Amino acid sequence: MTFLGLDIGTSSVKALLVDAAQRTLAVGNSALEVARPHPLWSEQDPEHWWRATLAAVAEVRAAAPEGWRALAGIGLSGQMHGATLLDAAGRVLRPAILWNDGRSGAECAELHRLVPDLTVRAGNIAMPGFTAPKLLWVRHHEPDVFAATRTVLLPKDYVRLRLTGARVSEMSDAAGTLWLNVARRAWDDTLLAATGLTRAHMPDLVEGSEVSATLSATLATEWGVARVAVAGGGGDNAASAVGIGAVRPGEGFLSLGTSGVVFAVTDRFVAAPERTLHAFCHAVPGRWHGMSVILSAAASLSWVAELIGAADIGALLARVADWAAEPDRVRTAPIFLPYLSGERTPHNDPEASGMFAGLRAEHGAEALVYAVLEGVGFALADGYDVLRAAGAPLDRCMLVGGGARSELWGRMLADMLGVTLALPEGAEIGAALGAARLAILAAGAGSEASVCVAPTVRQTFVPNRAMAQLYAPRLARFRALYPAERAARA
């Protein structure tokens, strides 16, 4: 038996074919583009998701024809929050409004006025990234489109519709719409009504490891496979957590990508909407997750490297590691706020800006880069403090993402968060593997304990108490800067 994981991302669709032992048999990838027709807008044509899916699948079929014929299940992962609007015949009415679209700020405030207990029902505050404000925007600005809308689907669930003909979503992705009562894992009629919708507009809901539908007869014949089951799947972060085996309470991951994420699994609903904690369902039954997000993690490192003209970031980080070996240099280094694109957790401030504080003539390139690494770490520590206060502490977690290649950064983060970080062996673990694992579970080809295992660990970073004490006064200075920066904008 083999299993296919499909990850419907923002920049590409990835396809991963694995066998029952989760060995990779073939990988496919097809690029996507984002349209930005107006300031703050971010859109994609759902038809492009489908074409990219077909192209990625074709690549997998060509690379592993024998394994492909043994296909026993499909799992889906995808970018969250995207609003895909369909008419009564299932036709797409307009380009999908994506997770990083910022046009619906006024509608967020309107939702809080319309539903005073929104944060209690949804577990989250309204932000333009979520799906519900987007529909309110369409209702106000494109009334004909809104009136014709009969179904709203998330990106991966539109691909599911094309695969199976079924209109189904699952708990982790649905939690990012602001229409789900996250604690109860069910659509909320009051939240829906605030945007002029009812449950009739919503897809059915399953758990991520359950069967959602079956591959259509037409596609099964065309692809030369059986009518295999399609698992519920998961939103991208939840699927990534399944891919690294983070499914039990106290487990999670820290992702150092363009943005930064700290993800913690719980066996109960936890929330802190006033501090911009994302409180979502997990992609496995009976579990939830808290997630803190900063907007510029590795993006801050790329920014400063370009600023100082460093083409080789690896060599630059090696120089910084040598520079930071002297504690006195660390004590007197500049402090950096990494709010280059605003900030989410804990400030929820799109207007927040980055800054260096404490610059002196003796500070060179290494001091600036060190300050950036440290500032991103402090911002992630702020996010982890929100998680811990909400009741979602981490025993240890995996360190993933492009920034995880830096040993210096890994050690710094462990010291700052006070959490042991485990760096997985081999290639980066992606959401497509989590989707494939959910397909294995839905097909009944393994148990959660046997399927959702952690990868082999290449390196472990254990918190260093002495370094934590060195960082403490610097963290206090870091935390004093944002209120001052905000007051300066007032």
Image (cartoon, rainbow, N blue to C red):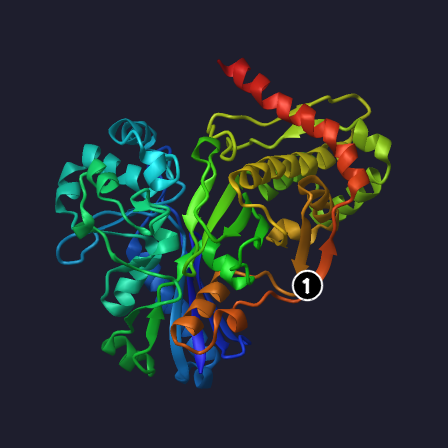
The answer to whether residue 12 is above or below residue 474 is below
User: Which image quadrant for residue 8?
Assistant: bottom left
Image location of residue 438, percent across then percent down: 43, 67
The quadrant holding residue 146 is: top left
Q: What residue type is labelled 1?
A: Val
Q: Position of residue 29 (x, y in %)?
A: 46, 64
> Residue 9 appears at what percent x and percent y?
43, 55
| Residue identifier under label 1 | 457
- Which residue does the image show at 47% across and 69% down from the upper left? 437
Note whether 72 is above or below 281 in the view shown: below
Looking at the rendered structure, the secondary structure element under dot 1 is strand
Say left or right for 133 vs 93.
Answer: right
Q: In the image, is 441 to the left or to the right of 149?
A: right
Q: Which of 230 and 362 is in front in this view?
A: 230
Image quadrant occupied by the N terminus: bottom left
**Quick one: 275 or 21, which is closer to the camera?**
275
Instruction: Answer whether residue 127 is visible to the viewer in this image.
Output: yes
Number of marks drawn = 1
Q: In which quarter of the image is residue 221?
A: bottom left
Place of residue 260 in the rendered image (x, y in percent of width and height, measured from the top left): 56, 44
Drawn side of residue 461 relative to residue 362, left or right: left
Identify the residue at horizontal 52%, vertical 60% (top origin). 430
